[in-house]
Structures are given as structure tokens and as C-alpha cells.
Amino acid sequence: MAEFKHVTVLLHEAVKGLAIDPNGIYVDATLGGGGHSSLIASRLKSGRLYSFDQDQTAIDYNRQHLQNVIAAGRVVLIKDNFRHLKAALANHGVTSISGIVYDLGVSSPQFDDAARGFSYQHDAPLDMRMNQQQQLSAKEVVNEWPYQRLEKILYRYGEERFAPQIARNIERHRQHQFIETTGELAEIVKEAIPAAARRHGGHPAKKSFQAIRIAVNDELGALEESLEQALDLLQVGGRISVITFQSLEDRLVKTIFHEKSSLPNLPQGLPVIPAGMQPHFKLVNKKPVLPTPAELEANHRAHSAKLRVIERIKKN
Ligand SMILES: C[S@@+](CC[C@H](N)C(=O)[O-])C[C@H]1O[C@@H](n2cnc3c(N)ncnc32)[C@H](O)[C@@H]1O
């Protein structure tokens, strides 16, 4: 099996955030190269870890990489989208968990393998599916989605200010010829951005590629659905660690965690807060945990990473 070169971001911080009980039931929602899973498994005695990934490559790699802990019954691999968290765990008889970690986005092998069609740096057929069995791919989004829908995702998921110009240029090109490759798309995006604006920031296609990837994999929808289920499954004292890599994801996690850990609007002048109204969760850190300067220097993927941790303090 080829090496799976992914350097885990905020490895120790995210696992420390879970405050592992060696006999607890844990979930790694984003197995990838197995960095977080290995460390969690090494802390377990009679506990068990369920590790999810929707990418068959990650599952196949970890079947070997984690074979000892799998054979010992400490780790179970689940090939599924984490948006099916509750149902997939219920299939294994699990209805409550001690903790779960999410390390979002794509893994380095997904990005670096040209054939997966995620990157504007390699010319390859447009794809961007994390789950190779999924129907919707970037080819369909780029060639078939109407102008308004394209503009909306470029703006919303890419925070791309030239979204209208880019969507229009995509529409113009595809009238003549099907857009087949990442290289063609990168050129079409670049062409739509005024030359002066191209001189600043990163690659001109970076934001558009991010937007299309988020749409293809419905990344924000899956995260929101999954977090709601994870919060529900969490036992008292249980924790959720989430590592995000872009502002939209981080905003979503921050909003949900704040809502869950805040008091509802109370009538003015209540002398004490009724027990039933107290929040069921607390934020473990008020501010997100960021990578250390040493990690930032060693791993460029760590640059936009933020870790947020929440704990259940009360059952319903
Ligand atoms: C950044 S990598 C995780 C790296 C991992 N923590 C490690 O240490 O190697 C993210 C992984 O999560 C998977 N993933 C992303 N969204 C998912 C989802 N909704 N359901 C299941 N897996 C998902 C991707 O396929 C990818 O393999």
C-alpha cells in the first residue's frame, strides 16, 4: 500500500481536548491518514474508537496502518459520511459516546493525487468527490448548474468577490465546449478576474475551487447535521473537538457551540436561573486553540487551523 502522506494538524491539542477516559467510547469523524485515531487508540484500555471516512482510500490505508488496534478490538472503521453518525453508530449498538473529534476538509493525499481532481495545481479531469461512489461531481456543478446557483456558491462558499464575472465566464465557455479538466476551469476563472486583482493574494482560482469542492461534498450541510447528532449522543462529561480550516466552517461551529452553551433569553429580574433553563453544554476554551509557531513553521496546512472544544455538563 502506498504511503499516505498527511501530517496531522493540532494532533495533541485535539486529543487533549477530549480528556480521554481509557474505558470510553470515542469517534473519529474524519479518519484520513489515521493520525488522531492512532493517538486516541493508544490511550484506550477497554474503550473503543469508531473511525469514519467517506473516502475508500482512507479506509483501505487504515485497514493496514491500524491493523494491530483493529485486531485488538479497540478500533472499528466505518466507511460512511459523518452526516449519518447516529444511524451508523446504532448499527454497532452505540447510542451514547464519550467524545468525538472532527478534523475537517480534505487530506493531503486527496489534494495531491491529481486524479481526484481537487487541485488547480495539477491538470486532471474535474471531480472533487471525497466519496468516490457519490453521483454529483465538480464536472456536473461546473457544466450543468445554472448561472445563479454557480454565482451563489462562488460567493457564499468561496467568499469570491468576482463571483458574477466568474460564473458568467463559465457559462460562456460551456456553451461552446464541455469543461473537462481542472486546468481548463483554472484558466476560465483566471480570465474572469481583472488583471490588477490577480496580483494580490494566492492563486486566482483558489477561492473558486474551494467553493466548488464545498458544494460537491455539501461540506457545511454535512457538518451541521453531524454536529447536532454528536451533541445529542454525548454523555455528561463527554466532549467534541473540532478543527476547522476556513472561516465558513469555523463560523458554523462557533455559532452552534455558542448557542448550546448560552443561557436562553430570560425574563428580566429572575433572582435565580431555573434548573431546566441552564445550558447543557459549556465551552472548554473561550477562544479557539491555534497551532504553535513551531507547528506553523513545520506544516503549511496548519495555517488557517482553529480548534474548538465543547463539553456536555448536564443531561436533558
Ligand atoms: C483533514 S483529513 C483528516 C486527517 C486525519 N485527522 C489524520 O490525522 O490523518 C479529513 C478526512 O475526512 C474525510 N471527510 C471529510 N468530510 C467527511 C464527511 N462528511 N464524512 C466522512 N468523512 C469525511 C475526508 O475524506 C478526509 O479523509
Image (cartoon, rainbow, N blue to C red):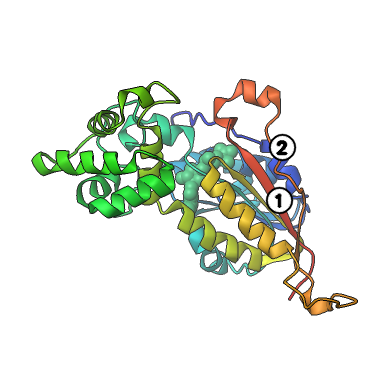
Separation of marks 2 and 1 at Cα, in angstroms: 13 Å
Q: Amino acid at mark 1?
A: Val
Q: Which mark is residue 309?
A: 1
Image quarter of residue 239: bottom right
The residue located at (26%, 43%) in the rendering is 167
Which SS class for mark 2?
helix
The residue located at (67%, 58%) in the rendering is 257
Report if the CB atoms under discs 2 and 1 are less than 8 Å apart: no
Q: Which of the two labelled residues, at mark 2 and mark 1, occupies the earlier sequence position?
A: 2
Image location (x, y in percent) of residue 216: 35, 50
- The extreme right residue here reads 271
Q: Which mark is residue 100?
A: none
Which SS class for mark 1?
strand
Evaluate whether residue 58 shows in this view. yes
Evaluate whether residue 50 shows in this view. no
Please determine whether, in this image, residue 299 is positioned above or below residue 173. above
Image quarter of residue 165: top left
**289, 270: nearer the viewer:** 270
Image quarter where the C terminus lies is: bottom right
**17, 63: nearer the viewer:** 17
Image location (x, y in percent) of residue 164: 30, 44
Compared across the picture, whether 102 is left or right of 214 comes to right
Please determine whether, in this image, residue 44 is positioned above or below residue 33. below
Compared across the picture, whether 70 is left or right of 134 comes to right
Compared across the picture, whether 164 is left or right of 75 comes to left
Q: Amino acid at mark 2?
A: His
**51, 185: nearer the viewer:** 185
The residue located at (74%, 64%) in the rendering is 262
Q: Which mark is residue 12?
A: 2
- The extreme left residue here reads 176
Image quarter where the N terminus lies is: top left
